[in-house]
């Protein structure tokens, strides 16, 4: 008979008196501190964590800012649950600089009000010269919504492009929710120009082309490229999803803003925190008259981007340095293997071969081979609740550590975390 583990849950006063808790509780509102301790005890009561982990769990809870920094050892590069992109150094610095008063809607030379986001718009146009104008909003979904709202009339969308982007949200339902019902065109696997031609009419406002960014349809398929759809004469909005600005040789099937506009899209929309590697945001770019209509639409105000997003996006666009997202994608297998063998020397385990994925609604067909360290499955939870939190991938009941998204300087931190998770007996 083992004793009821719940009897070992430390009392609130003991947790509060723990020096580790004291260290992170300094300067934190007392209601927040007590609540964090209660939550940790409750997790132990429910058997979700061990009684000895209550202090560590409370420390984790208290150590977070709004969102707590974690180490991404999953191998999923654009991980939506982990905040998608890692900002480049310049963008991180820009966030700090931009956090005070900033000339967001203010022209320093004239002393007058200026258009919000004027400088970041300029950066976007410098990077995609065939766009006449651009607008930055809160995220990719808002960019698509506002583009459609800027074009009065019905929306045509291929059935095979009616995408659920994540967390149960579907783009066509988003448009319908804003009062712009979508006319479905073609079949799930195939759509032809004549389908669009049959569906188009007097009332057609735009044709939306959504990049199937998080799935692939294989087999008997056909879709109509932007340039062919554009030949019908209705404005085409191309939602390219992941925000490549120009073609990328390593991602030949990923659409990019420049090419979509060159093929005749009136507007192109994308997220700024996927392959672009910036902060959360969405961009509308293309024809000047349509971008201006989007800018002046009454709902635009409810989707406007934050000054910190402008600062980080601008720095991302201006940097010569490749964003970490693309750098991680291109990390060599040999380099990763070398790092992983060092880690294996330090903590044991078995080196296995896995494939990393881009993730986050980008490049669904692309998998990037690489090595991972396979450890006992029980370590996953301990690493997750540790300090720092290390998020791993669980596969076939093994805990897999993939170093592709781990900055090389943090390999030692991972080794430390694994040792701590293995416990003193190991
Ligand atoms: C990711 C994605 C969206 C949604 O963008 P958010 O920035 O998550 O709002 C819309 N369309 C496509 C094709 C996408 O890949």
Image (spheres, rainbow, N blue to C red):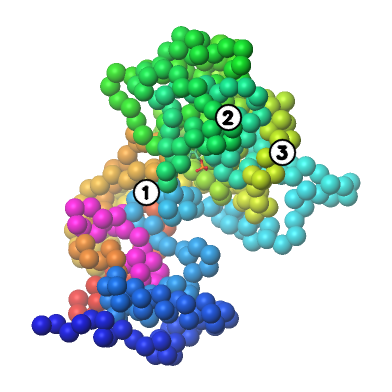
Position of 23 compared to 265: left or right?
left
Q: Can residue 184 be seen in this view?
A: yes
Callout 3: 10 Å neighbours few (<14), some, many (20+)?
few
- From the top left corner, tell me how far across and down residue 227 is, in percent: 53, 16
Does mark 1 have its CB less than 8 Å from ligand 1?
no
Q: Is residue 321 visible?
A: no
How many labels were placed on the picture? 3
- From the top left corner, tell me how far across and down residue 121 is, in percent: 69, 39
- From the top left corner, tell me how far across and down residue 322 is, in percent: 51, 45
398 magenta-colored: yes
| Distance between mark 2 and mark 1 Cα atoms | 34 Å
Residue 294 numbered tag: none
The quadrant of the image that shows the C terminus is bottom left
Residue indicated by mark 2: 180
Residue drawn 24% across the image and 77% down it: 423
Residue drawn 23% across the image and 81% down it: 5
Residue indicated by mark 1: 76
Callout 1: 10 Å neighbours few (<14), some, many (20+)?
many
Occupied quadrant, residue 293: top right
Position of 25 compared to 116: left or right?
left
Residue 298 numbered tag: 3
- Between disc 2 and disc 1, the foreground one is 2
Position of 289 compared to 51: left or right?
right
| Distance between mark 2 and mark 3 Cα atoms | 15 Å
Callout 2: 10 Å neighbours few (<14), some, many (20+)?
some
Taking 202 as reference, is 33 above or below it? Answer: below
């Amino acid at each position: 008979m083992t004793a009821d583990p719940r009897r070992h849950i430390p009392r609130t006063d003991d947790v509060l008196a723990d020096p580790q808790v004291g260290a992170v509780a300094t300067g934190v509102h007392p209601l927040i501190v007590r609540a964090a301790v209660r939550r940790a005890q409750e997790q132990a009561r429910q058997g979700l964590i061990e009684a000895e982990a209550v202090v560590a769990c409370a420390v984790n809870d208290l150590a977070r800012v709004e969102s707590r920094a974690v180490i991404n050892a999953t191998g999923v590069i654009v991980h939506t649950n982990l905040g998608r992109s890692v900002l480049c150094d310049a963008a991180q610095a820009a966030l700090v600089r931009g956090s005070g008063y900033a000339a967001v809607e203010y022209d320093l030379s004239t002393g007058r009000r200026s258009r919000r986001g004027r400088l970041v718009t300029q950066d976007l146009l410098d990077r995609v010269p065939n766009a006449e104008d651009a607008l930055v909003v809160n995220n990719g979904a808002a960019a698509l919504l506002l583009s459609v709202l800027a074009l009065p009339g019905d929306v045509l969308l291929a059935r095979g492009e009616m995408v659920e982007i994540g967390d149960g949200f579907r783009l066509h339902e988003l448009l319908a929710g804003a009062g712009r019902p979508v006319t479905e065109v073609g079949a799930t696997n195939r759509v032809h120009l004549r389908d669009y031609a049959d569906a188009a009419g007097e009332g057609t406002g735009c044709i939306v082309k959504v990049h199937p960014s998080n799935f692939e349809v294989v087999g008997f398929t056909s879709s109509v490229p932007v340039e062919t759809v554009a030949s019908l004469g209705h404005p085409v909005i191309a939602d390219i999803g992941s925000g490549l600005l120009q073609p990328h040789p390593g991602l030949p099937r990923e659409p990019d803003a420049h090419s979509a506009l060159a093929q005749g899209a009136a507007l192109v929309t994308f997220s700024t925190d996927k392959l672009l590697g910036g902060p959360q945001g969405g961009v509308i770019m293309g024809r000047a008259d349509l971008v201006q209509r989007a800018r002046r639409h009454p709902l635009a105000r409810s989707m406007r981007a934050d000054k910190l997003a402008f600062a980080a996006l601008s720095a991302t666009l201006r940097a010569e340095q490749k964003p970490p997202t693309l750098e991680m994608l291109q990390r060599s297998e040999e380099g990763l293997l070398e790092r992983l063998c060092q880690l294996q020397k330090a903590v044991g385990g078995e080196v296995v071969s896995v494939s990393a994925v881009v993730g986050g609604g980008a490049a669904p067909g692309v998998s990037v081979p690489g090595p991972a360290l396979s450890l006992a499955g029980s370590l996953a939870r301990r690493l997750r609740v540790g300090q720092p939190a290390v998020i791993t991938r669980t596969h076939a009941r093994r805990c897999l550590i993939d170093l592709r998204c781990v900055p090389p300087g943090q390999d030692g931190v991972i080794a430390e975390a694994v040792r701590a998770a293995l416990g003193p007996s190991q």
